[in-house]
Structure formats: structure tokens, C-alpha cells
Image (cartoon, rainbow, N blue to C red):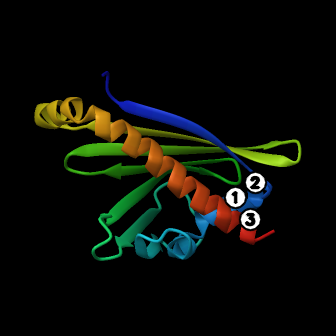
Amino acid sequence: MPFPLTVSQTFSTSASPAAVWQALESAGRWPKVIATLAEVTVEPPGALAAGSIIRSRAVPGSGAADLTYRVIAAEPPRHLVLVIEDEDYTARTDYRIAQDGGETDVLVTSTLNPKGIAQSIRFLLWHARIAPALNANVRDRTQALLRLAEENL
């Protein structure tokens, strides 16, 4: 398996690109639709921009981890890139939002790249579990965020 591990999925919604962007940017509302999140904050508060930090705190006992996302690119309402730098891996999620007739398509590409030889070996050994888990995570989070966007119709 070559690294990084990359998955791409496209989702469609009746929400406008602006509503999808608002759902992505309203990180404090994410716990409303993502059950494993207790709290999410953005630093500095307000509109997402390159350099913004999103901190999520997981619900204790949910199996989810507390995460810190760095915004790499923010081009409302069309493009958002978030990166997580963990000691064991780097994760990057790229959201591309486009109007397609009456629907809005959201292409989500997520990459997971292990750090160091030990993590690379671990990723190789656990590939059969990691790849489906990454796919499920992308699907579940994006569908939840699209539900949030659709509430604003």
C-alpha cells in the first residue's frame, strides 16, 4: 500500500454552496450533528481563514479523540482544507464545493500519512482496518455536516 492512504467521496445535497460553507464554518454547531463531539471551538473566533485553528473535544467514552485542525486553505464557499498534525500521522481533508444544477456536490478527499517507520509498518499491517475506517469517517462526518447545512434551507 503506497502512502499516503487517500480516499475520495462525492456527496450531493439540496443545500446551496453557501449553506454548506456555513455548516463547515459553524464549527461550534458540529456537536449538534456529530454525536462523538462534546465541544468545538475556532481560534480566532469568526470566519475560517488560512491559519485558523479548530479544536474539538470528544465526548468521554465515545472512542473519539480530541483533535486540533489547522486551516490550510479557506475560499468561501468553494474550498476548505484542514490538517491534523499528530505525533503518529498527518491527516488532511480537502472539501471542494460546487453547484451542479439544483444540487450542490461536495468532493471530500482525505489523506492519512504515517510518520516514521514504526507507524508505516503499523499502517501496512492494519491497512484492512484503517482504509474502511477512513472511508466511514469521511462519509459519516460529511453526511452529518450536510444535515447541518440542510437545516439552514
Which of the marked residues, 2 or 3, is nearer the chain's N terminus?
2
Q: Give residue 47's quadrant in the image.
A: bottom right
Is label 1 in contact with label 2 (beta carbons under 8 Å)? yes
Quadrant of the snapshot with the N terminus: top left
In the image: residue 129, left or right of residue 20: left
Q: Which mark is residue 20?
A: 1
Please name the amino acid that badge 3 sits on.
Glu
Q: Position of residue 8 (x, y in %)?
A: 53, 35
**Residue displayed at 35% across by 71% down:** 58
Q: In x, y percent, where is residue 75?
A: 65, 50
Tell me the tag on residue 150. 3
- Residue 22's place in the image compared with 40, above or below, is above
Which label sits in the foreground, 1 or 3? Answer: 3
Answer above or below: position of 51 versus 97.
Answer: below
Local secondary structure at mark 3: helix
| Three-letter code for the amino acid on which mark 1 is drawn | Val
Instruction: Between residue 136 and residue 117, name the one nearer to us.
Output: 136
Left or right: 7 as drawn, with respect to 147? left
Secondary element type, mark 1: helix
Residue shown at 40%/40% (left/top)?
132
State the residue position of label 2.
17
Sort mark 3 into few (<14), some (14-19) or many (20+) by Cα contacts within 10 Å.
some
Image quadrant assignment for residue 101: top right
Q: Earlier in the sequence, mark 1 or mark 3?
A: 1
Question: Distance between the Cα atoms at labels 2 and 3?
Answer: 11 Å
